Image: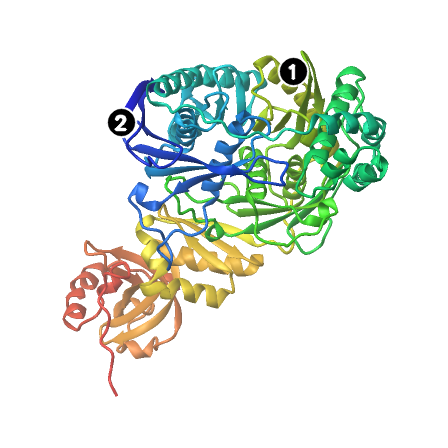
Amino acid sequence: MPESVSLEIGGRTLVIETGELAKQANGSALCRYGDQNVVLCAVTASEKPREGIDFFPLTCDFEEKMYAAGKIPGGYIKREGRPSEHSVLSSRQIDRPIRPLFPDGFRNDVQVVATVLSSDPLLDSDVIGVCAAGAALAVSDIPFEKTVAAVRVGRDENGKYLCNPGLEQYEAGGMEVVVAGTADAVMMVEGSGQQISEEDFLGAVEFAHENIKKIVASIDELAKKAGKAKREYPLLKVDSRLEAWVKKSFADDVAKAMRVVDKQERNAAFDGLSRDAAIARLGDKNPDLRLLLEDPKNADFGKIIKSMEEEELRTMVVDEKIRPDGRAPDQIREIWSKVGYVPRVHGSAVFQRGQTQVFTAATLGSISDEQRIDVLLDSGNKRYMHFYNFPPYSVGETRPMRGPGRREIGHGHLAESALVPVLPPKEEFPYTLRLISEVLESNGSSSMASVCGSTLALMDAGVPIKGHVAGVAMGLILKGDKYTVLTDIQGLEDSLGEMDFKVAGTAEGITAIQMDIKVAGITIEIMREAMVQAKKSRLFIIDKLKETIAQPRTELSKFAPRMIIVKINPDKIKDVIGPGGKVINKIIADTGVAKIDIEDDGSVFITALDGESGEKARAIVESLTKDVVIGETYMGTVTRLMNFGAFVAILPGKEGLVHISQLAPTRIERVEDAVKIGDEIMVKVVEIDEKGRINLSRKAVLGGSTNGEAESFSERREPRERMGGSGGGGGGMRGRRPRRREG
């Protein structure tokens, strides 16, 4: 029988079970949350450590299958293929808080697989996946220091914090923050908001941590009841004799290399501290140490050098208040930016901060260019997309160019989240927006540079965003009880430091945030200090962006499509589309517009490469959906002749009868004496009867009067029905068509 614990979180019951499913894994847990969300997580560790590596080989996967939401995948192939963007982001949310909590030197492969078995389409399961992973690790025999859990925080319309709100709730409240942590500290933060204040954000983190503590306590209770004893796994430890010799022999070299300002020169200096250099320096003095250095499977030397680099960085930053590139802790690197960098794209910009350089291009498309999302959640389509690319040359390396990895997807999502709150609503600016950020040089904080580049590119494209958005990455260096918060960290401070805290926003507040740490958690006080520095830096960067472009351009690029919006009665949509799309395709072909998109509410979006074709399409759409008004005058075309009058098309799909008595100012004997088929004549609508049939008068337009004729005019309508006429069209589709003459 399975063991379980339960508690109330966010107004729903969270049940955590173990012992019934996936029992061959080292540990497994099933989390049931609310009425529909069920996530199973299994964790497995290899029997032996992987040799010759200097990192912990952890793999986290968040598996979403469409059956969980009662759906069948769209497209031709009905089996799920590569993971969705949401799956990748959710996998990262599991990886980031648990990775620092494994023992130092642990080199066994560990795989964490969280599978969504059932999903509420309005309640994201990603935080439940983190809780399931924390529970699976807690009950497993894999060494893991502290239990981890996560929650999502939103707000209601009154500003009250909500735990694990549904999609509609956190969209209405203007804030969504995911927080993961242990009972003692916060491990990971990621989220976005509608320009929220630093205090509101910190309040959300504190609120989240209180709920995390409750979940952690329940998981620990489950582990006491059903957890396995922790196994003894071998931990990689460096040879103490080699460590002592390397530290003594290379201390000055590490200190000197750490103080080289230029990244490439610094990397070259560190590359000089190689195994071969150590062997040459050691000579034949110590054969045992030489054997260790010459063993290609032994990674001790590299690990020792890295630890020395970390210690030297701590000494410089915490004790001497000097950074490797000579900056003060709160100093931002030199900034340079330019818009309109290339001519053909709709908007472009280059943003450079120190040795990090990003080129961003903005492309405007039609409504139908939105990204269609085929996932478990009912999150709708995306009209704003940001894609981040990190080619190997940006860091002076060579490697195969393949599809985007998890890092690229994560950085792109963060930059995307930062700009969404300032975009104009669809009703005001009905374009799909696709931004591509190409990292041309990288020395830290490239994701935040892409935020700045996106702001400039959007403004260069003429997108009326609400304000400039800037981003900065904050770091943390710990040394015992002392610490220093760093502004605008470079690559070395990111890789050797304890925190990467990215904050993006406008002058009004935060729009996106992401925090990762490499230690067993940080306090709210450290986060508050980091956010104070981040706000100061953000305002400084925004001023720099304003120097490049103060506000969005008032006109779109000449290469950008023009968008015209027409609002029609939803009942008239079928008249614009036509059978099998015949009408709408003819409008596109006749006018030369690129696309015409119609939404269910009657919004018609005409995408044209020039204003003239767009206006032609607008006129046709309006004419197709325009109602005939009594007393209005129309230019019509004679379509049929009868002995009692002529039928005239006055609008697409709408025709009326001009009785013979109304064809001319004076009496005529035959209809053919006044008009012939194909003539364009001006007519006035004098009557629409109870059946919707339209009666017209040419006589009224030519100066004659319909007075005295009304009675006979009305009385003579019956014959045209017997003759098979359309009865004035009856508003178009309801009128009967004339029989086609054969031969």
Image height of 243 relative to 268, above or below: above
Label tally: 2
Q: CA distance from mark 1 to mark 2?
A: 45 Å
Q: Is residue 316 left or right of residue 629?
A: right
Q: Nearer the viewer, residue 43 or 628?
A: 43
Residue 714 position within the rendered picture, expressed as x and y whole percent measured from the top left: 19, 61
Q: Is residue 631 visible?
A: no
Image point 46% across, 23% down: which residue? 148
Residue type marked 2: Pro
Identify the secondary structure beneath mark 2.
loop
Within 10 Å of disc 1 (Cα), the crowding (few <14, some 14-19, many 20+) is: few
Image point 15% across, 66% down: which residue? 718
Nearer the viewer's eye, disc 1 or disc 2? 2
Q: Nearer the viewer, residue 616 or 351?
A: 351
The first of marks 1 and 2 along the sequence is 2
Q: Which residue is mark 1?
A: 529
Residue 300 position within the rendered picture, expressed as x and y whole percent measured from the top left: 69, 34
Q: Nearer the viewer, residue 429 or 686?
A: 429
Q: Is residue 504 left or right of residue 212?
A: right
Residue type marked 1: Glu
Identify the secondary structure beneath mark 1.
helix
Q: Which residue is mark 2?
A: 2
